[in-house]
Amino acid sequence: MHLDSNLDVFDSVLTKLHDHFQSRYYDNPIKNKDASTSELAQIDELFIYLVETLPMPDEVKYRTLFFAQLCDANARIHWRGYYWTTLSNGALNGKMELIERRYQEVFEYLYQKPHKA
């Protein structure tokens, strides 16, 4: 395995994200009990913004694991994170209906059949 030493400059950011993940999904051990919920909200906003603005066709973007697990009930069965990802996630407020509708449209376009939610 090749280690990328250039990632070392991101150690503090990655540690902070890891600690936030541990505190957001509290079924895991909490390592940083003082994690700021405003920082979590900013991270959620950033992630959703990046996903929404990915420079790729919807036919590719909406078939990624993120959208499959977010919009497909069958995929959600095997993903514990759905509840915690959507719980109190202000970045998704008002967007889930649009995301699910676009996921359905892409599925129908690609597979020429309706997606069963």
Image (spheres, helix red, strand yellow):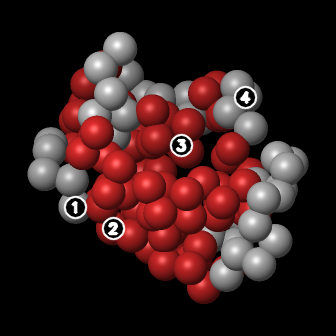
Q: Residue at x 60, y 85 (%)?
A: 38
Q: Which residue is mark 1?
A: 53
Residue 15 lies in what quarter of the image?
bottom right
Residue at the outermost bottom position = 38
Q: Residues within 10 Å of mark 2 (few under 14, many from 20)?
A: few
What amino acid is at disc 1? Thr
The earlier-in-sequence mark between 1 and 3 is 1
What amino acid is at disc 4? Ile
Q: Position of residue 45 (x, y in %)?
A: 44, 73
Q: Which residue is mark 3?
A: 71
Which element type, helix, strand or loop, lies under badge 1?
Answer: loop
* Residue closest to the eye, 45 or 27: 27
What amino acid is at disc 3? Cys
Residue 96 seen by the camera: no
Q: Residues within 10 Å of mark 1 (few under 14, many from 20)?
A: few
Q: Which residue is mark 2?
A: 49
Which element type, helix, strand or loop, lies under badge 2?
Answer: helix
Q: Residues within 10 Å of mark 4 (few under 14, many from 20)?
A: few
* Residue closest to the eye, 115 or 25: 25
Residue 23 lies in what quarter of the image?
bottom right
Q: Which residue is mark 4?
A: 77
Q: Position of residue 51 (x, y in %)?
A: 33, 55
Q: Is residue 91 above or below residue 76?
A: below
The earlier-in-sequence mark between 4 and 3 is 3
What amino acid is at disc 2? Tyr
Q: Are marks 2 and 1 in contact (CB under 8 Å)?
A: yes
Looking at the rendered image, the quarter that the C terminus falls into is top right
Q: Position of residue 6 (x, y in %)?
A: 24, 45
